[in-house]
Amino acid sequence: MKAVMYYGKEDLRIEDIEEPQVRPGTVRIKPAFNGICGSDLHLYQDGPIPPAPGEEQPHPLSGETLPVVLGHEFSGVVEEVGDGVDGISVGDSVVVEPLMIDGTCPACRKGMYNLCEQMGFIGISGRGGGLSEHIVVEQQWVHRIGDMPLDQAAMIEPLAVCLHAVEHAGATAGQTAVVGGAGPIGLLTAAVLKAKGITTIVSEVSRTRREKALSAGVADTVVDPSSEDLAAVVADLTDGAGADVAFDAAGVGVVVGQLLGVLAAGGRLEVIALHSKPVELDITDALTMQERVLSSCIGYANNHPEAIRLVQEGRIDLAPFITSKIQPEDIVEKGIKRLLDNSGEEVKILVSLE
């Protein structure tokens, strides 16, 4: 079968590989759409970093070395089920929670399997990926989606990331939230906040993405922090109190400072983005003297079912965030390079495998 293989820095190849075989407790899926993730961009631009394996160092759970099949944000249709699989049938539309865990480390035993000591990702660490004609996945990671369109379903994985962040932050209806950064994660975080009845302010320098936040209905207010005073806007909208919670979806130090500056006394900043550089922080002034909370989160744990429900119930519409669909042979030129070179004009690029 054909698959997009990741060999390392700036090296993706479409190759013929062996068909995966169904085993007891597993499900064979034909992928339909696969989203290009920020993690994919980092792997392409910078080379393999954990949880990706190396050329000689295998991932501890998959046992695979490079190359591996790429793609972890994907939807598809069930083609075959193995012995012992219940509740999933041939023809079901599904998404995959693309995790590998050992199930035995302290985090896994606490139910916080997103923090597994040996964490791996299908589509990054091995065990196949969404950018292939077929994949076999353990039943526990397969979620049925009913009649949800398969292109939108490919965004359930990043939506689960954002749902986890909102729940980790403890945001509740009636509060006011500020989201810093309106890339895919920022916009989807705003979508979750709006679905939960939270007044949402989006701060973003890209005009295109500010417009997307408004047209998609996920922001009550948008702010360009390069030309507007974010703190003044938030103060005006909250009668001087400040925001209850803020979300860093930008991964830039200056945004962390801006978001802490708009929080109310006792407010909370949740960091979702991965920061490539250390952030300097005056803890006394930014946190202690206002009893603010700084927290962070990664991935998801048991969030996919609710993410699916929010879409099925019409509380979140994922369609506006799909800005391009491409073919596998165009993944570098029309996918990865476009996102790297012109990311402000795109939200989510999907690779079509139908």
Image (spheres, rainbow, N blue to C red):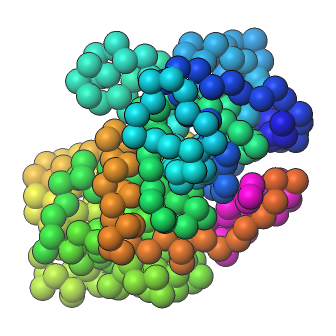
At horizontal 81% and vertical 53% (from top left) the residue drawn is 328
Question: Eyeballing the image, is 301 above or below 293?
Answer: above
Counting the numbered discs, the total is 0
Is 256 placed left or right of 94 in the picture? left
Q: What percent of the width, then of the height, locates residue 157?
A: 48, 51
Image: magenta residue range: 330-354
Residue in front for this viewpoint, 131 or 354 = 354
Q: Dividing the image into 4 quarters, which one contains the N terminus?
A: top right
At horizontal 44% and vertical 50% (from top left) the residue drawn is 144
Residue in front for this viewpoint, 1 or 14 = 1
Q: Residue 331 in magenta?
A: yes
Quarter where residue 33 is shown? bottom right
Q: In this orientation, does residue 172 appear?
A: yes
Residue in front for this viewpoint, 246 or 72 = 72
At horizontal 52% and vertical 60% (from top left) the residue drawn is 153
Question: Eyeballing the image, is 79 above or below 332?
Answer: above
Question: Eyeballing the image, is 315 above or below 126?
Answer: below
Q: Dividing the image into 4 quarters, which one contains the C terminus?
A: bottom right
Is 82 placed left or right of 48 in the picture? left
Q: Residue 90 in magenta?
A: no
Quarter where residue 42 is shown? top right
Quarter where residue 62 is shown? top right
Q: What percent of the width, then of the height, locates residue 333?
A: 86, 59
At horizontal 68% and vertical 61% (from top left) the residue drawn is 350
Question: Eyeballing the image, is 128 above or below 296?
Answer: above
